[in-house]
Every structure is written in structure tokens, then in C-alpha cells.
């Protein structure tokens, strides 16, 4: 398993939201590129970037910050938030984004996800399964759908998607621990690489996710608040990986 530090962007700043609520924002840094360098220097092998303005409004107000992050680090980044079509996915990929994350489009325009898979390759496309009480949320988590997390994932598999990010939106930014039950169910039913976000509060949470066989864990609030020491967490998970408990 890998740990992916999260950098959430809003109006050019590095922020965190509580449960995705845009009115409950904490600004952590006014220079996201510096944050990216810090996490890379700490030992992260990949960064998870979210354009919060794009996720909610479909407008990419943070393009400059994303470009600065790409130029600041030598590790790959995955980016989501406002990616609505295959053309945008191609632009991001060409700009240096290694993995492009579709969220809302997976519900509203699945053909665009399929087109992106065919264009830039399945290894460079992720679908974000953002769910509350088992049902997928879209438009920056402001709209609820009637589609279950597992049904969305299965629909995407049929279109060639091979990697997913699962977020329990009710836990994101809360440090209330991951939804282990939902993660276990999804990993059992899906059998494709899953990266987990939402509620991670301790190294023990990371170990628990690794033992469930997930590919990665995204940490945001925990590493910004100091609840998790990223360097120590990476070392702990690397040892667990090396022991053979998690491939």
C-alpha cells in the first residue's frame, strides 16, 4: 500500500474542508507548491491533488497552482475536481498529470470516461466513488444520486476503468476513522485497485486499510493537523509492505 498526501486547492490556496462543506474551510498554506515539495521531501511517492473550485463549479480556477506543483516536484501526481470530459483529461495528461480522476462525469457523462480510457490509457484514469450512506455524490458532493457505490464501480469496469478512489464523504476531514466496513465490502466485490480517502486519523487506521488489501490511502487532515507524522507513517507502511502482509 502507498500513502498519498492530499493537496486540496481553492482560490489558489491549500485548504481542507470538513465533510466537503465549502463553508467549513481551513486554509493551511498560501503556496501549494511549497506544500508539494514538503511532502515529496518527506518521502511521498505520489501526490493527490483536488481542484475544489473545479469540483463544485466546473471552472478550473487553480490551473496555475497545479502547474506550479507539477514543476515543483519530480513525483507523479493524480488530479481530480472538475474533469468533465475526455478533452480536459487529455489536456491535464499532456500538462504532466499522471492520473486524471473523474467524479461527476462518471454519473453524468460515462461515455467521456470511456473515451478518456481509450485515449490516455486505463492506467492514467481513476474514477472517484464519493459516497454517503452508500450512495454516490456529485458536483463537489453537493448533489446526491440514487446510484450505489458498487453499482457505479461495476458500471465503470465495463467501460475499461481499472482503478478507483473510494471516499466516505461523511468522514472526510473529520479524523473519525475510515469506513472500514464499506471499504471491505468494496474490495471484496470489486477486485480492482482501490485507493481510500476519508476519516483517516492514525497510523493504526493506515495499517487497517493495508490489511484490507487496498492499493493506497489518501491522507489530508491527519498530516496537516499533525495527527499523523507522514515520514513515520510511510516508514511503517513500507515495513508492512516488505513483510509480505500487503503487496
Image (spheres, helix red, strand yellow):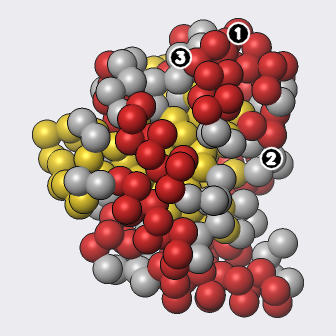
Position in image of residue 174 (x %, y %): 29, 61
Position in image of residue 136 (x %, y %): 49, 30
Secondary structure type for disc 1: helix
Q: Which residue is mark 2?
A: 192
Task: Tell whether label 1 touches label 2 (CB within 8 Å).
Answer: no
Q: Quadrant of the C terminus?
A: bottom right
Q: Which mark is residue 111?
A: 1
Vertical position of residue 190 compared to residue 72: above or below: above
Tag 2: Cα neighbours inside 10 Å, few (<14), some, or many (≥20)? some
**Residue at figure coordinates x 54%, y 40% from the top left:** 79
Q: Give 7 or 205, whichever is nearer the viewer.
A: 7
| Sequence-earlier tag: 2 or 3 | 3
Front tag of 2 and 3: 3
Task: Tell whether label 3 touches label 2 (CB within 8 Å).
Answer: no
Residue 143 in view (yes/no)? no
| Sequence-earlier tag: 2 or 1 | 1
**Residue at figure coordinates x 38%, y 41% from the top left:** 65
Is 183 on the left or on the right of 143, as rendered? right
Q: Give 147 or 121, whichever is nearer the viewer.
A: 121
| Sequence-earlier tag: 1 or 3 | 3
Front tag of 2 and 1: 1
Q: Quadrant of the N terminus?
A: bottom right
Numbered disc total: 3
**Residue at figure coordinates x 37%, y 48% from the top left:** 8
> Label 2 to label 3, Cα distance in Å?
23 Å
Residue 191 in view (yes/no)? yes
Q: Which mark is residue 84?
A: 3
Secondary structure type for disc 3: loop
Secondary structure type for disc 2: loop
Amino acid at each position: 500500500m502507498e500513502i498519498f498526501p492530499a493537496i486540496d486547492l481553492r482560490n489558489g490556496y491549500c485548504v481542507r474542508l470538513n465533510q466537503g462543506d465549502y463553508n467549513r474551510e481551513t486554509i493551511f498554506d498560501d503556496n501549494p507548491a511549497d506544500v508539494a515539495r514538503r511532502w515529496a521531501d518527506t518521502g511521498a511517492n505520489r501526490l493527490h491533488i483536488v481542484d475544489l473550485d473545479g469540483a463544485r463549479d466546473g471552472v478550473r480556477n487553480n490551473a496555475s497552482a497545479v502547474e506550479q506543483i507539477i514543476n515543483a516536484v519530480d513525483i507523479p501526481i493524480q488530479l481530480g475536481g472538475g474533469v468533465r470530459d475526455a478533452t480536459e483529461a487529455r489536456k491535464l495528461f499532456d500538462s504532466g498529470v499522471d492520473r486524471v480522476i473523474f467524479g461527476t462525469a462518471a454519473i453524468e457523462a460515462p461515455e467521456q470516461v470511456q473515451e478518456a480510457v481509450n485515449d490516455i490509457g486505463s492506467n492514467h484514469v481513476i474514477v472517484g466513488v464519493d459516497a454517503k450512506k452508500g450512495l454516490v455524490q456529485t458536483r463537489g458532493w453537493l448533489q446526491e444520486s440514487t446510484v450505489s457505490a458498487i453499482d457505479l464501480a461495476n458500471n465503470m469496469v465495463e467501460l475499461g476503468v481499472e482503478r478507483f478512489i473510494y471516499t466516505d464523504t461523511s468522514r472526510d476531514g473529520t479524523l473519525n476513522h475510515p469506513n472500514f466496513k464499506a471499504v471491505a465490502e468494496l474490495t471484496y466485490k470489486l477486485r480492482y485497485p482501490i485507493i481510500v480517502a476519508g476519516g483517516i486519523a492514525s497510523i493504526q487506521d493506515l495499517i487497517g486499510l493495508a490489511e484490507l488489501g487496498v492499493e493506497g490511502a489518501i491522507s489530508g487532515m491527519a498530516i496537516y493537523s499533525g495527527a499523523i507524522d507522514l515520514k513515520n507513517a510511510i516508514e511503517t507502511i513500507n515495513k508492512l509492505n516488505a513483510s509480505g502482509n500487503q503487496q
